[in-house]
Each structure stands twice: as structure tokens, then as C-alpha cells.
Image: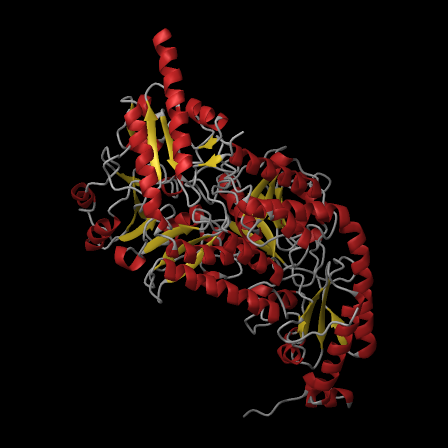
């Protein structure tokens, strides 16, 4: 096999937290449901409808199996953003009369934070927990924040920028003891780490299709049946998905998500092991070639497919311009067009200068060892080149503490 | 056994090969449209191309906002909850996603032909329309009745109300012209026009300030959070273009539909076509067979390999009769015998003959049973 060549228009993909390529086996599984078995799964009067409905229910089973749920607890949505909105607003609005306090965390995805902010405008109290330097919440702080008014705790399973895994089981136990519902945005966790909604006492769990090698435009929300969690729906209409989510179910996309979950159930363990090896190789390679780099977020409590690294003295955007043959990002995809430093990194206490020098490197199913070596080579070369041009780097090498410099005003 | 004949295109249509091809190509890009790198830019380009295709398909001005959603239902919801107008007034025969979009809606009555009376409508606006958004569908999903949306928009604007039209069933079956209708908002769905399920759009003039229902990463100009359904959107764009290009085929379908209706009415004077003399979609027919429940008919047709429905798909499986016919003042005992037949591009002359002979056979069986009893 000849070595692949990567270009600006066809870069080496290292952005698996933004989206995962749709697995060709998923595309193939979807294939019959576009044209041949095209029925509306809600058509109850004919063969085409039944065929589509059967496919939807099989897919629901695969999704449920992956997280230890039962099929009746899976609601299909258009994606994790909708799932998060539905979980948080749906629970808050149903139980709001009695309990009006919500706890979440400052490093959550924008859609969780926005949902909470919207509820604050409706009169809910929201506590935004800070995180420790390693990106994990402090369980004692969570315990202290809970009151008898706390209706919901929403803490993400895996952070989209730094890949850290929150202590789900411990959070679940605390919530159960306080009779508080526990929602977790598991978009970045599903198919990457084992999840068991019963063992972890999770009441609501958001799933994204396109983060688990399935298609975009499909997601799911796990909603616990025992003890039952109730929701006020966000989208009303034909009453599909047990009235929790109206709208025609997109059969091909549902089938794709089901296939993706089935593959994840089978392959997750081996894939995680492989990616752990790549993660180590990438981090070790970069550390060996580049001095003064810092990993953001805990290394141990972290999914194997993510590294978020600050390259001191090198501006992140400039670095990305120099390595256009690598598809990486400086933060979450949603905000990637903005130049603001990541609020997630700021929340870890990473200084603004250092936050500006960060890259998110996402590895996944189609990453090869050759890719890792190529990335190490390219990043190391570019960082070292940019540092050679940097007066700050010169000063730092000369032992001058940059922070002690009093810059002349002008 | 005879091949199955699908006559339920208002529920969903098979995805067109060109749309499938676009959808599969989109899935092979493997980039998030919000990412700035190569794959991300390719994905973004695909979304923007589709937006232009949809814009052209409905003749929306370049300044109009086109917001991709997950389906027609979501587009309807966003229109009625996100337009900033607290009072929602909707036609009595609207789709459930409009009737239930907000907790309280004021219903505009329709006559026995399913049409809104403009004078009555204007009276309802007498108190002023500044706080109102009006939603009137272009074509009804069950009866196919075409509402006079242009006229309704003109009246509503006199009172400064916003006007939304659910054009989900109309697109691809009649010419849909956003600019000519003069509406402020319009909902579309991909899977009713041979695009993939899981994609829809809300179109709005530049002056409508939309508020997101599910904010998130700020996609779609902050109006609809969530990573775009790239494959669905790409397929939607292609299907929209084709739907417009192939509108001429509707004349053929209308002739087939008219023959089907004539055949049924000839066969029995106990049959009726809802809103027979009203302007309707060229492919849709809602037919009653006196004394025979729609569910019974649909099952019998299914055994004959004919796929039809007893009303809207989302409501199918529920036994109560159509709310649309109720709103038209059609008695329940008649309404519950109505079966919807909706034709598509694949429908042939033979299909019509097969339906007519199945219909006649069922009718004769039932009337014999009745006279024997």
C-alpha cells in the first residue's frame, strides 16, 4: 500500500469529537430504507408502514442494548441538542411546581447551558458547578449544592473538548438518594466507554448519531420507566414516540443509528484498547519532540480518542494555519469560527495565553498508526518553527518570566 | 401475487435515487459543517447549496431566511412558537403539529368544502392582528383541499398579523411560490417530495425575528441549534429541485385521479368524494363508502396489495375518525368511512384499474352482506 498524502482539501481527519465519519457498514444498512422499504413507520394500514416500523423497533433495541436500557425507554430525536433540550426543559416543566432547582456544570455543551439559562428566565434556580483543574466535578461540592428542591442534575458523561469522564456512578447514587433526576449528555461517551443506566442510576441520557459513526440528524433520549420520569414535550403534533416527540421518524437515519450502536456494542472494547495505544503514542511523540506542552484535562479519567494540548508560546490559530493538512480544531465545532478562547479550558483555570495555544486532537475508528506518526511529525515541526520565530519563546528560553514584564503602554 | 401498489404518497414517498445519491455522498464526507477544516468546509458547502436549491424551488427571495429543521412538524412548531407573536390563530383543518403547536390556539372555522370564509376570517381579526400569527395550510394532507392562502395573507396583513403556511403537502404537487403567496413563514418537508425523512425547512422573510426552540451551538443563524442533518439536507435540496422540474407530471396524475373518482362514483351512489368540487391537490382523493368503516376498507385493500390510508399517517392506528372531516361538519358516521388515496410519480393506469376493481369488489361484498342481514 502506498502512503497516503494529505492536503489542505483532503486533510488527515483528527477531529472525531466534532463528528465521526459515518461507518460504511452503517451507510449500507440504511440503503434499503430510502427507496425500497420507504414506508412511513407510523402508517399502520399497510405493508410499507409495518416494514418501516419493524426496522425502527429493531434499531431501538440496538440503542437500548448499548446502554443497558429497555426499548420502551428510548425516544428518537433529531440529535443530541434536541435530546438535551427535551430532557432538561421537559423535566423542569413537568415537575417545576414542586421542585425548581437544577444543578449543572460550567463545562457542559452550549445547548445544556442555554437550556438552563432559558429556565432561569422562567424562574428556575440553576447552580453551575465549577470543575477542578483536571476538568472533573468535585463530588462534595455537588452534594453540598443539592437541596430538597433540586429536581435535576445534568452533568455530561464525557466532555467534548477535553474528553474527561465524569464520575457518573457516584453522581447517580447521590441523585437517587436525594430523589433528584440525573440527566447526562452522553453524546461523546456512547460507544466510547461502557454505560449502564441501571448501574449508574441514570434517569435521562442523550445520544447523538453522528458522534458514534452513525448519520447526522438523528439522536435519542433515554427516559427511565422505573421509577418513571415524565416530560413535557417540546414538539407537539401527531403524537409519535409516545407523545414525547412528534414528527415522522426518519427510518433510514433511525436504522443507521441502530446499526452504529450495534457495531459499538461489539467493537467498543477492542477499539478502546487500540485507541489507548494511539493516544499514548501521540502524546509521547509530541512530548518527546516538543518541550513545554501541557495536557488539558485528566489523563486517566479520559476517553482514549481525545487529547487536548496547549503548546505554550504558539498561537493556536496560527498553528492550525500551518498544519492545514491536518483536520483538527481549537475547541468545539459549534464555536470553531470564533476566536474566543474555549470556556471549557478557562473553567479548568488554564490561563488565557495558554488556552489560546490549544489544539483538540480527536482519534477514532479509522485512525491508523501511520496517521499518528504523521501528525506528530507535522505538529512538532510547525510548533518548533513558530517558536523559533517567537520573541516570547526566546525570552522564556533566556529565563525571563514573561509575566513579570511590564509592557510599555502605547 | 400481484405487485403491491403504493397509493399513500401523502404519508411518505420513496426517496428518489438522485436524492439517495446526494445523501450517501454527504455521509461520505465525514465532516461537521461547523468545522473550519477541509472536511468541514465541504460539508458546509453542501448545506448552502441545498439551501439555494430549496430557495429556488419555492421562489423565495434571496433575502429570505431558510432554516433547516428535522421535519415539517418541527418547522411548524418553530414558526408558531418562535415568531414572537403570542396569539396563534389557525385553520380548523390544520395538521396536528399546527393545532397543537402551542397550548391554546384560536381556530378559524371552515365550510363543508374545507375552505375558510374570508369574511368570517376578517371579522376574527377585528380586534387587531399585532399580536397574532395566523397559520393556514396551502394544501390539506387528508382532503387535498387548497386553501386561498394568498387572499388570507392579504387580509391578515391589513391587520398586521404574521402569516404562516404549512406547504408540506403542496410542494411538488402544485407550484409553490413563497413570494407570490405573500406569506411571512412557510414550512416544508423533504420526505413528502421524494427527499429523505428527517429534513424539513422553515422559510421566513427577513423581517421575521425567529427565536430558537432548542438553542445550542448556534447553528442556522442561532435559530435552530444542533449539528445539521447533512445527508437529509443534501437529499432535500436535490429533491426540491426535481419536484419543481417535474411538476408537469401532475397533469397526468390529475387525469388518473379524476378517472379513479369517476369510476368510484359510477360504481355506487353510496360513495362520495370529500370536497369533490373544490380545488384540490391533483394526486389526492378522500373517498367514503357508506356503511363500511375505513379501517375495514384499508385492511381489505391491503389484502389486495393496495396501500392506502384512513387519514393522516401520524393519526393512523388510532381508531377515532378524522378531525379534518369533523371540522368540515361532516357527520362522524360518514367521516369514519373515508379512505385517502394519494398518487405519486410511479402511479400507472393499471394501478387505477386495480384500485377500481378492488373497490367495486369490496363494495359489492359489503352490500350483499348487508342485504342478507
Q: Position of residue A130 (x, y in %)?
A: 64, 59
Q: What sort of colour scheme is used for the picture?
A: secondary structure
In the depicted view, which residue is nearer to us: B243 or A152?
Answer: B243
- Along the line of sight, the residue nearer the viewer: A376 or B232: B232
Q: Is residue A190 left or right of residue B83?
A: right
User: Would you identify the image quadrant in which residue B308 lies?
Assistant: top left
Q: Answer with the quarter of the image where residue B102 lies.
A: top left
Q: Is residue A341 placed above or below B79 in the rendered structure? A: below
Residue B60 place in picture, x, y as percent:
34, 61
Image: B57 above or below A404: above
Instruction: Assign the C terminus of chain A to one quadrant of the image.
Output: bottom right
Q: Is residue A346 visible?
A: yes
* Residue B291, x across and y down, in percent: 34, 18
Image point (40%, 42%), residue name: B97
Q: How many marks can you see? A: 0
Residue at left offset 37%, top offset 29%: B356
Q: Quadrant of the N terminus of chain A?
A: bottom right
Residue B331 position, x and y percent, is 28, 24
Q: Is residue A81 above or below residue B30?
A: above
Q: B215 or A260: which is nearer to us?
A: A260
Q: Going by the image, does A257 lie left or right of A99? A: right
Observer able to see residue A87: no
Amino acid at each position: 500500500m502506498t502512503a497516503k498524502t494529505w492536503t489542505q482539501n483532503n486533510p488527515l481527519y483528527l477531529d472525531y469529537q466534532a463528528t465521526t465519519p459515518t461507518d460504511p457498514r452503517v451507510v449500507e444498512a440504511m440503503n434499503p430504507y430510502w427507496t425500497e422499504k420507504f414506508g412511513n413507520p407510523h402508517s399502520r394500514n399497510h405493508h410499507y408502514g409495518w416494514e418501516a416500523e419493524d426496522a425502527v423497533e429493531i434499531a431501538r433495541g440496538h440503542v437500548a442494548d448499548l446502554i443497558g436500557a429497555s426499548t420502551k425507554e428510548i425516544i428518537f430525536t433529531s440529535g443530541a441538542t434536541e435530546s438535551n433540550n427535551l430532557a432538561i426543559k421537559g423535566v423542569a416543566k413537568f415537575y417545576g411546581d414542586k421542585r425548581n432547582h437544577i444543578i449543572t456544570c460550567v463545562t457542559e455543551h452550549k445547548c445544556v447551558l442555554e437550556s438552563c439559562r432559558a429556565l432561569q428566565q422562567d424562574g428556575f434556580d440553576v447552580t453551575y458547578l465549577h470543575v477542578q483543574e483536571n476538568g472533573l466535578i468535585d463530588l462534595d461540592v455537588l452534594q453540598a449544592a443539592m437541596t430538597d428542591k433540586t429536581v435535576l442534575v445534568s452533568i455530561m458523561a464525557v466532555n467534548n473538548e477535553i474528553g474527561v469522564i465524569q464520575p457518573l456512578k457516584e453522581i447517580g447514587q447521590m441523585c437517587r438518594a436525594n430523589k433528584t433526576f440525573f440527566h447526562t449528555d452522553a453524546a461523546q461517551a456512547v460507544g466510547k466507554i461502557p454505560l449502564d443506566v441501571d448501574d449508574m442510576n441514570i434517569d435521562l441520557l442523550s445520544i447523538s448519531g453522528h458522534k458514534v459513526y452513525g448519520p447526522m440528524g438523528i439522536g435519542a433520549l433515554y427516559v427511565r420507566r422505573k421509577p418513571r420520569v415524565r416530560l413535557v414535550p417540546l414538539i407537539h403534533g401527531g403524537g409519535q414516540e409516545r407523545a414525547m416527540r412528534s414528527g415522522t421518524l426518519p427510518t433510514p437515519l433511525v436504522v443507521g443509528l441502530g446499526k452504529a450502536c450495534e457495531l459499538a456494542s461489539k467493537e467498543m472494547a477492542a477499539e478502546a484498547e487500540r485507541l489507548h495505544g494511539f493516544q499514548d503514542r501521540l502524546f509521547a511523540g509530541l512530548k518527546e519532540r516538543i518541550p513545554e506542552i501541557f495536557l488539558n484535562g485528566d489523563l486517566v479519567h479520559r476517553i482514549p480518542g481525545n487529547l487536548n494540548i496547549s503548546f505554550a508560546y504558539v498561537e493556536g490559530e496560527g498553528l492550525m494555519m500551518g498544519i492545514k493538512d491536518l483536520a483538527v480544531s481549537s475547541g468545539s465545532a459549534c464555536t470553531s469560527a470564533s476566536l474566543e478562547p474555549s470556556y471549557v479550558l478557562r473553567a479548568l483555570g488554564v490561563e488565557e495565553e495558554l488556552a489560546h495555544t490549544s489544539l483538540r486532537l480527536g482519534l477514532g475508528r479509522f485512525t491508523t498508526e501511520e496517521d499518528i506518526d504523521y501528525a506528530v511529525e507535522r505538529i512538532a515541526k510547525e510548533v518548533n518553527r513558530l517558536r523559533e520565530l517567537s520573541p516570547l519563546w526566546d525570552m522564556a528560553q533566556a529565563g525571563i518570566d514573561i509575566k513579570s514584564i511590564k509592557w510599555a503602554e502605547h | 401475487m400481484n405487485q403491491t401498489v403504493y397509493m399513500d404518497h401523502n404519508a411518505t414517498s420513496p426517496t428518489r435515487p438522485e436524492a439517495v445519491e446526494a445523501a450517501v455522498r454527504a455521509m461520505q464526507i465525514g465532516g461537521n459543517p461547523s468545522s473550519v477544516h477541509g472536511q468541514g468546509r465541504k460539508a458546509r458547502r453542501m448545506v448552502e447549496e441545498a439551501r439555494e436549491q430549496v430557495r429556488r424551488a419555492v421562489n423565495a427571495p434571496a433575502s429570505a431566511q431558510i432554516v433547516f429543521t428535522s421535519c415539517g412538524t418541527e418547522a411548524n412548531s418553530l414558526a408558531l412558537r418562535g415568531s414572537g407573536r403570542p396569539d396563534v390563530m389557525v385553520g380548523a383543518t390544520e395538521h396536528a403539529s399546527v393545532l397543537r403547536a402551542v397550548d391554546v390556539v384560536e381556530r378559524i372555522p371552515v365550510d363543508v368544502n374545507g375552505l375558510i370564509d374570508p369574511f368570517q376570517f376578517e371579522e376574527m381579526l377585528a380586534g387587531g392582528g399585532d399580536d397574532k400569527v395566523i397559520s393556514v395550510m396551502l394544501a390539506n394532507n387528508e382532503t387535498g383541499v387548497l386553501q386561498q392562502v394568498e387572499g388570507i395573507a392579504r387580509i391578515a396583513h391589513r391587520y398586521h398579523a404574521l402569516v404562516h403556511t404549512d406547504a408540506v403537502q403542496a410542494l411538488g404537487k402544485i407550484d409553490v411560490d413563497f413570494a407570490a403567496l405573500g406569506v411571512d413563514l412557510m414550512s416544508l418537508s423533504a420526505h413528502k417530495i421524494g427527499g429523505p425523512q428527517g429534513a424539513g425547512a422553515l422559510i421566513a422573510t427577513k423581517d421575521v425575528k425567529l427565536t430558537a426552540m432548542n438553542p445550542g451551538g448556534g447553528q442556522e443563524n442561532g435559530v435552530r441549534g444542533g449539528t445539521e442533518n447533512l445527508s437529509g439536507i443534501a437529499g432535500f435540496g436535490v429533491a426540491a429541485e426535481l419536484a419543481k422540474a417535474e411538476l408537469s407530471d401532475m397533469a397526468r396524475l390529475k387525469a388518473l385521479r379524476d378517472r379513479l373518482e369517476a369510476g368510484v362514483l359510477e360504481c355506487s351512489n353510496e360513495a362520495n368524494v370529500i370536497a369533490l368540487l373544490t380545488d384540490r391537490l391533483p394526486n389526492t382523493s378522500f373517498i367514503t363508502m357508506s356503511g363500511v368503516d375505513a379501517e375495514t376498507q384499508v385492511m381489505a385493500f391491503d389484502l389486495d396489495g393496495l396501500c392506502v390510508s384512513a387519514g393522516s399517517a401520524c393519526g393512523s392506528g388510532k381508531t377515532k375518525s378524522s378531525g379534518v372531516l369533523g371540522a368540515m361538519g361532516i357527520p362522524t358516521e360518514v367521516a369514519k368511512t373515508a379512505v385517502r388515496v394519494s398518487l405519486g410519480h410511479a402511479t400507472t393506469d393499471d394501478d387505477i384499474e386495480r384500485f377500481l376493481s378492488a373497490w367495486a369488489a369490496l363494495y359489492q361484498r359489503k352490500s350483499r352482506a348487508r342485504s342478507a342481514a
